Amino acid sequence: MPTAETAPGQATAARWPVRHSVRGVAGPIRALERSQDILTVFVGIALILLAAVLLVSGVIDFVQEVSGSTAMSSAAALLLDRVLLVLILVEIVHTVVLSLRAHRLIAQPFIVVGLVAVIRRILFVLSLSNQARVGTTELALLIAMVVVFVAGLIAVSRFEEREP
């Protein structure tokens, strides 16, 4: 029950009385939050290490393929695919950092990760177009996904601007 009178339509969440039993769980809640933060930091570190390994591996593979008999365009396409995968991992780490700072989930970095992933797939599919025929349906679906992600990014940006 609310403890103070509120006008119709006003939020009453802050006006609910605190029960004694809720105060008793404040310590465990803080411990869980600290544990979550520590685990999130370890996940971020693991993602950074994975991104570094992928980037170094991609450059090594690129150099080996260029020095071998593989065409430069094919090697460049594979390096681009690897670099975009690293970019996705870096964006996920950025999301982890924002989550640690704000202690809430922020939608924009997830949309950016999805957008980069779709663009990565489009570039990969198009780079293989000379080797195999690209399906029109798949390409149309990927382009539609880009449009949806961009629209979502714009909508979330405008929504967050209106928040106080």
Image (cartoon, rainbow, N blue to C red):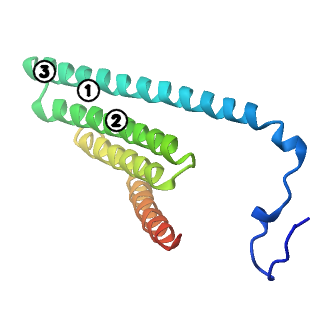
Of the residues shown, which amino acid type is indicated by label 3?
Val
- Dot 1 or dot 3, earlier in sequence: 1
Marks 1 and 3 sit apart, C-alpha to C-alpha, by 12 Å
Residue pointed to by mark 3: 63
What's under tag 1, amino acid-wise? Answer: Leu
Instruction: Identify the residue shown where x is 75% and y is 31%.
Output: 28
Q: Earlier in the sequence, mark 2 or mark 3?
A: 3
The residue furthest bottom is 8
Q: Is residue 62 above or below residue 90?
A: above
Give the distance between the C-alpha atoms of the residues marked 1 and 2, in whole angstroms. Answer: 9 Å
Few, some or many C-alpha atoms within 10 Å of disc 1 (few <14, some 14-19, many ≥20)? some
Residue at 10% x, 23% y: name it: 66
User: As shown in the figure, which amino acid type bears the numbered disc 2?
Assistant: Leu
What is the x, y in percent for residue 60? 18, 19
Residue 81: percent from left, percent from top:
28, 36
Residue 128 spot, x, y in % from top left: 27, 39
Tag 1 secondary structure: helix
Q: CA distance from mark 2 to mark 3?
A: 18 Å
Label 2's element? Answer: helix
- Which element carries disc 3, helix, strand or loop? helix
Residue at (49%, 24%) from the top-left corner?
A: 42
Compared with residue 98, is residue 61 higher up or lower down, i.e. above or below? above
Nearest the viewer among 22 and 44 is 22
Of the two numbered discs 1 and 2 on the same chain, state the one appearing first in sequence: 1
Q: Nearer the viewer, residue 161 or 28?
A: 28
Q: Residue furthest right?
A: 1
- Tell me the residue that label 2 is attached to: 85
For disc 1, the marked residue is 55
Q: Residues within 10 Å of mark 2 (few under 14, many from 20)?
A: some
